[in-house]
Image: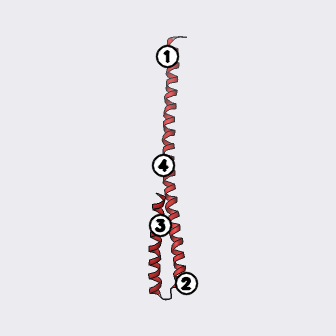
Amino acid sequence: MKASSYLHQIQNIEAKVHALVEQYQAGQDRLQAAHQEIARLQQVIQEKETEIKNFQNQDNISKIVQTIAVDTASSTELKLKINEYLREIDKCIAYLRE
């Protein structure tokens, strides 16, 4: 074979290796973006679960207040006090998780 033929084959191999490296880097970039998206979605899920828990707490508080309090002023005050207690409990739980 001629030297130019070898040179041509080496150039072809080099071009293919370069293309593979570019494809690999693009795949790595997509993988990193996917990991970031997963982390973002996990955060959204956690926030939504917290919202659901808060709504459930609010519903439970309303039920408790309705069964305990007779007048509107008492029920509002009782509801606010229970909310305050729940916020303090949530702070304690968050502190213990750290």
- Disc 3 target residue: 90
Identify whether 50 is placed above or below 79.
above
- Asked if labels 3 and 4 touch by Cβ distance under 8 angstroms, the answer is no
- Disc 2 target residue: 67
| Whole-number angstrom distance, CA of label 4 to CA of label 1 | 43 Å
Assess disc 3: are there few (<14), some (14-19) or many (≥20) residues with their C-alpha within 10 Å of its C-alpha.
few
Tell me what residue is drawn at x 50 percent, y 31 percent. 19
The furthest residue to the top: 2
Assess disc 4: are there few (<14), some (14-19) or many (≥20) residues with their C-alpha within 10 Å of its C-alpha.
few
Q: Nearer the viewer, residue 43 or 28?
A: 43
Q: Which mark is residue 36?
A: 4
> Which callout, 4 or 2, points at the residue further toward the start of the chain?
4
Q: Nearer the viewer, residue 63 or 22?
A: 63
> Which callout, 1 or 3, points at the residue further toward the start of the chain?
1
| Whole-number angstrom distance, CA of label 4 to CA of label 3 | 28 Å
Q: Which mark is residue 7?
A: 1
For the N terminus, give its image quadrant: top right
Q: Nearer the viewer, mark 2 or mark 3?
A: 3
> Which callout, 2 or 3, points at the residue further toward the start of the chain?
2
Identify whether 37 is placed above or below 61.
above
> Which callout, 4 or 3, points at the residue further toward the start of the chain?
4
